[in-house]
Image (cartoon, rainbow, N blue to C red):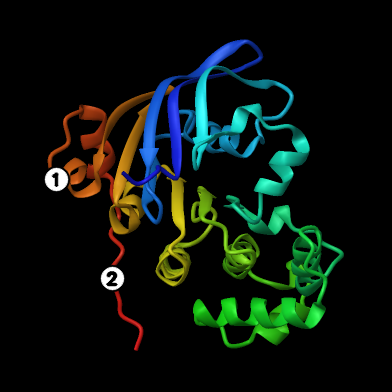
Amino acid sequence: MQQPLLEFKNVEISYDGEPTVRGINLTMQPGEILGIVGESGSGKSTLIRAAMGLLGPDGLVNRGEIVYKGQPVLDLDDEALRMLRGPEMGMIFQNCGSALCPIRTIGEQLYETMAQHGISDRQLVQEKATALFEKIHLSDAERILKSYPFELSGGMNQRVGIVMAMLLEPELLFADEPTSALDVTVQAQVVREMMVMREAFGTGIVVVTHNIGVVSFMADTVAVMCKGKLVEYGKTREVIDHPQQDYTRQLIAAMPRIKKVRHE
């Protein structure tokens, strides 16, 4: 039997001693796309931040286990977690532009990401980054690499975030509301580009969003969260076509549509 890529086992998470996520059980397989959907404050981003060790000083996993490829991540020290982030687990943030250093070029920041994990050949980093930009149909990689974040649009910075997260070809990619700060046209582009990464590298993706349309388009499995609890969980088409909960039906009723297109 194939070992799961990621598991949440009866996970409870609190902030300042107050439980915000309770009793979460989720399992995803290698190469799977899991969508976690719910309104703001439902606890969906808290889950992936716990898996990445990014809850901050006020957050705590009080109960349960988070397991990556058979390894409980909550038992890892800071150095072991740092080595896991990048080569094994990558992350795309809601607003990648704000997560980038404003006074360093994109190329320099991509190089620093690789250098932290022992890859210090600048030419190799540039070639790898250029190849990733080309995979998402951006032909002006040289200009992007020489640019500062403030010289790029929000959508372009999100694409930089995808490339940065995928430089080390992690097996698991977390995407935390990756399209919510973008206009509708750019949202669709960014979603398709994440799908390209799954197709190219077999990457498992956990996409967190309040937009069930994004989940409907890209996810194999969907978990619906409300007020810190899992209220519906199953294959995406089954949940979309036959929702069991009123909350899920309301999300579906508000769902925008992303048309599938083929790149020649």
Q: In the structure shown, which secondary structural element does the residue marked by tag 2 occupy?
A: loop
**Spot occupied by residue 262 in the image (x, y as percentages of width and height):** 31, 80
Few, some or many C-alpha atoms within 10 Å of disc 1 (few <14, some 14-19, many ≥20)?
few
Q: Residue furthest front?
A: 1
Residue at 45% across, 47% down = 206
The C terminus appears in which quarter of the rendering? Answer: bottom left
**Residue pointed to by mark 1:** 241
Q: Is disc 2 in contact with disc 1, using a CB cutoff of under 8 Å?
A: no
Q: In the structure shown, which secondary structural element does the residue marked by tag 1 occupy?
A: helix
The N terminus appears in which quarter of the rendering? Answer: top left
Residue at 81% across, 64% down = 115
Residue 165 appears left or right of 120: left
Residue at 65% across, 35% down = 53
Between 58 and 67, the one nearer to me in the picture: 67
**Spot occupied by residue 186 in the image (x, y as percentages of width and height):** 47, 67
Residue 260 appears left or right of 93: left
Could you tell me the amino acid type at mark 2?
Lys
**Residue pointed to by mark 2:** 260
Residue 48 appears left or right of 223: right
Q: Residue furthest top?
A: 17
**Spot occupied by residue 105 in the image (x, y as percentages of width and height):** 81, 71
Q: CA distance from mark 2 to mark 1?
A: 18 Å
Could you tell me the amino acid type at mark 1?
Asp
Between 22 and 200, the one nearer to me in the picture: 200
2 or 1: tag closer to the N-terminus: 1
**Spot occupied by residue 47 in the image (x, y as percentages of width and height):** 51, 32
Q: Report the number of numbered marks.
A: 2
